Image (tube, rainbow, N blue to C red):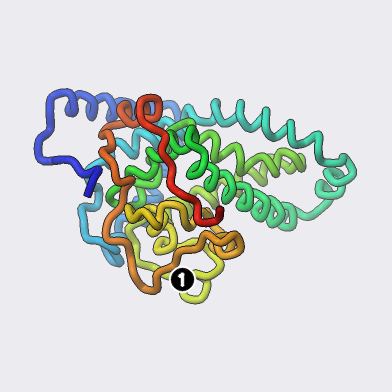
Amino acid sequence: MAGRVDRGHVSGPAMGASALAALGVVAAVVLHPKLLLYLVILAAIFVPAEAWRAVRRHRAFPAGTLTDLTHLAVNRVFGPMAFAGVAVVLGFGARVLVPSAVRSTVDEWPFAVQFSLALALAELSAYWSHRWMHRIPWLWRFHKVHHTIEEMGWVAGSRQHPVDWAFSAACAAVPMLALGLPAGIFGVYALASGFWSVLVHSNVRIRFGPLRHVVVTPEFHHWHHSDRREAYSRNYAAQFAFLDRVFGTLNRPDRVWPGSYGVGEVAPRGWLAQFTWPFRSPARVEADPGG
């Protein structure tokens, strides 16, 4: 398949880049100590789960894990600054379109009702922003870094260009900002959506029974990462799988998992190379089945 490269030889520059990446992860943990706790908890859940119910047998920490951890560190520690800028501009711009009476009414609702509304609106926004990333060339430049994943796993989902990460997070937050929802809503949504993202990228064979028609599962999202051309622009939903059925972008082969993953082109290795890739690669996008 196009996009695969020889991993048998590790060059001096590659080793140097790995050392810098490791230092970057350590620095991020020092600056943001909770990041280490976050990783330990996720590892305690997903390392045994992937060993017990693996979709594809591979090492617990396959090639590229250090790169993915670097993406995680950069986005979790430094990404919020970019996210804040984008979210403030978009969110408070949208806020002027919401009547003050609506914001006052929502402000009086119980937390659980507020969160349900926030989840519904955020997921709808996340669906369309994700779909735009596949349709709009300049957005695809950044989003395709995420699609260079060739071995799915709980760490792999962290591979996301900072521009892509900030744009995705801001679009999901815009409805909440527009309604003036309390800060606690953002925190709960971030925890829930973050955990679900790790789950659906994980190498865990789990289908959720009838619930798979409602919520996004690993099987559902693995197909979004398939290197088959017809699968590129399908299964955009982050947590609510039924959105793809509603908008005509559902791809659900019954009881079949993808055989391979990637973008079908030679992709760079290492965080720095992946960070600069969008600025020097073509912005080709795939046809959107939804039109």
Between residue 83 and residue 134, name the one nearer to us. Answer: 134
Q: Residue at x 61, y 26 (%)?
A: 85
Position above or below: 57 against 133? below
| Residue at the far left in the pictured view | 9
The structure residue drawn at horizontal position 41% and vertical position 52%, both measured from the top left corner, is 232
The one of 203 and 223 positioned closer to us in this rendering = 223
Instruction: Residue 2: give x, y in percent of width and height.
Output: 23, 45
Please name the residue shown 27% across and 61% down the image.
259
Residue 200 x/y as whole percent: 43, 57
Where is residue 196 shown, x and y percent of the image? Answer: 48, 54
Residue 186 image-quadrant placement: top right
Instruction: Report x, y in % for residue 55.
Output: 29, 63
Left or right: 151 in relation to 253: left
Q: Furthest residue to the bottom?
A: 210
**Quarter where residue 269 is shown:** top left
Position of residue 125 relative to residue 223, above or below, is above
Tag 1: residue type? Phe
Residue placed furthest toward the right = 101
SS label for mark 1: loop
Please indicate whether residue 109 sits to the left or right of residue 160 in the image.
right
Residue wearing tag 1: 208
Q: Which one is nearer the viewer's eye here, 269 or 34? A: 269
Q: Quadrant of residue 63?
A: top left
Q: Residue at x 48, y 32 (%)?
A: 138
